[in-house]
Image (tube, rainbow, N blue to C red):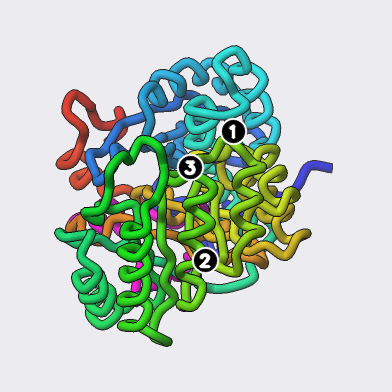
């Protein structure tokens, strides 16, 4: 027996046909969501602090889903290449369409890299679209929620990133003025002691300088905020171990990506050498790569980037593996409000979510890209609106397009 989609047409339902993000769904008569077909996929790029690739999936029912892919050269072209594989398909079949795209683009390298990133953008849009068609928030498509709001950690910067006191001042400002209780600072910053950065070796003065940044920042905010520190895959295994040991006495939330991502044995060796929590995962793709990272003991905290790693369901799969090893998930995120809200929906739906990153606090118009409020007092309240629960402000999108880009056809 076919499922009953009559509630989509009920004028007394909480979300009616014309409530869903302001869109007229147009499912006429007895037509149900199982009869809807994808008619087009479009992209445009917004010039944020990264070039955000926004993705829209269109249907013959007049309902559109919006997603986002991690920035990367060739992503829009790959999405255009995938579009014919989606035309005429039912957007509710997210898993099947995902696997279909993986298989059809295997020649382009769908194990990892920008091909997976392009599929991620489509997958996010399908979750937004399916939620609208079914009248449920996206987290419900992932099995429901553990929490009503998701913690956000703010990636912080200063004009003098190498100055420990400036970092401490900024940490205090972000806590006091912006309301965050979770922060991250970079440690791959110049110290004045470098001789040859290409060899990945940290000299004693460099380690003392980085330890001073950690000490000043953590002492300044103390119990008011958790603080993580990012190394951006910069150091050798030995130097990473020495750095991790040097900051063990401080309240470090995690030390992120201290070594290059390719060698899992070195990653595991560094993690096992220290009580400083080690995080990684941003440069890994799909659950297969993250599974090895987790099972080998390479991380204390896993940090997938949802619009890059494979999408919402793939991130959920990573979280499921991590949960078997009691490893928490802190989602890396440099996205617009669209990708950020998708991460929040996953954060609500998994038990082991720590936080979602926010990388755009210095960009004054980030929150103007959508009509809804996203981050308030360092948290994201997960919306009960169907789909992702955010609506693009097309005027704002148009104002901040990457040079040469055009708006979506329906804008």
Residue drawn at x 63%, y 64% is: 328
Q: Nearer the viewer, mark 2 or mark 1?
A: 2
Residue 307 tag number:
3
Q: Could you tell me residue 223's position as x and y percent?
A: 42, 87
Q: Residues within 10 Å of mark 2 (few under 14, many from 20)?
A: some
For disc 1, the neighbor class at 10 Å (few under 14, some 14 to 19, many from 20) is many
Range drawn in magenta: 365-390
User: Which one is earlier in the sequence, the residue at label 1 or at label 3?
Assistant: 1
Locate the C terminus and report the quarter of the image it occupies: top left
**Residue at image mark 2:** 245
Quadrant of res 230: bottom left
User: Could you tell whether 309 is left or right of 392 in the image?
Assistant: right
Tell me if residue 20 comes above or below residue 260 in the rendering: below
| Earlier residue among tags 2 and 1 | 1
Kind of element beneath mark 2: helix
Q: Secondary structure at mark 1?
A: loop
SS assignment for the magenta stretch, majority: loop
The tag on residue 363 is none
Of mark 3 and mark 2, the one earlier in the sequence is 2
Q: Report how many numbered discs are placed on residues in the image.
A: 3
- How far apart in space, not on screen, are marks 3 and 2 (Cα)? 33 Å
Q: For residue 358: magenta?
A: no
Residue 119, how many percent across, how many down? 53, 31
The residue that disc 1 covers is: 36
How crowded pointer 3 is (Cα within 10 Å; few <14, some 14-19, many 20+) is rated as many
Residue at 39% from the left image edge and 55% from the top image edge? 390
């Amino acid at each position: 027996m076919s499922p009953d989609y009559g509630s989509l047409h009920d004028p007394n339902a909480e979300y009616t046909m014309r409530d869903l993000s302001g869109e007229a769904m147009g499912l006429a008569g007895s037509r149900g969501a199982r009869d809807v077909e994808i008619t087009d996929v479009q992209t445009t790029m917004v010039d944020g602090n990264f070039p955000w690739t926004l993705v829209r999936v269109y249907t013959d029912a007049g309902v559109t889903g919006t997603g986002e892919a991690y920035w990367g050269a060739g992503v829009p072209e790959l999405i255009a290449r995938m579009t014919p594989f989606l035309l005429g398909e039912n957007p509710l079949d997210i898993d099947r369409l995902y696997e279909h795209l993986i298989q059809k683009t295997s020649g382009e390298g769908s194990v990892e890299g920008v091909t997976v990133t392009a599929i991620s953008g489509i997958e996010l849009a399908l979750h937004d679209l399916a939620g609208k068609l079914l009248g449920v928030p996206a987290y419900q498509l992932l099995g429901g929620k553990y929490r009503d709001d998701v913690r956000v950690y703010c990636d912080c910067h200063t004009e003098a990133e190498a100055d420990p006191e400036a970092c401490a001042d900024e940490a205090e400002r972000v806590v006091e003025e912006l309301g965050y209780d979770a922060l991250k600072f970079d440690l791959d910053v110049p110290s004045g002691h470098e001789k040859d950065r290409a060899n990945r070796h940290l000299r004693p003065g460099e380690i003392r300088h980085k330890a001073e940044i950690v000490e000043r920042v953590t002492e300044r905010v103390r119990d008011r905020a958790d603080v993580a520190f990012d190394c951006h895959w910069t150091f050798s295994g030995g130097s990473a171990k020495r750095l991790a040991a040097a900051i063990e006495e401080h309240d470090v939330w995690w030390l992120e990506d201290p070594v290059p991502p390719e060698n899992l044995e070195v990653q595991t060796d560094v993690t096992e050498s220290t009580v400083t929590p080690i995080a990684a995962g941003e440069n890994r793709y799909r659950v297969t790569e993250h599974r090895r990272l987790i099972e080998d003991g390479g991380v204390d905290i896993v940090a997938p980037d949802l619009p890059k790693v494979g999408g919402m369901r793939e991130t959920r799969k990573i979280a499921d593996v991590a949960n078997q090893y009691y490893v928490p998930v802190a989602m890396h995120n440099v996205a617009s409000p669209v990708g950020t809200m998708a991460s929040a929906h996953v954060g609500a739906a998994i038990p082991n979510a720590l936080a979602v990153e926010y990388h755009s606090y210095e960009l004054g118009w980030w929150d103007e890209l959508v009509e809804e409020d996203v981050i308030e007092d360092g948290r994201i309240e997960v919306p009960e609106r169907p789909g992702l629960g955010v609506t693009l402000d097309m005027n704002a999108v148009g104002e901040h397009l990457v040079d040469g880009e055009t708006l979506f056809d329906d804008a």
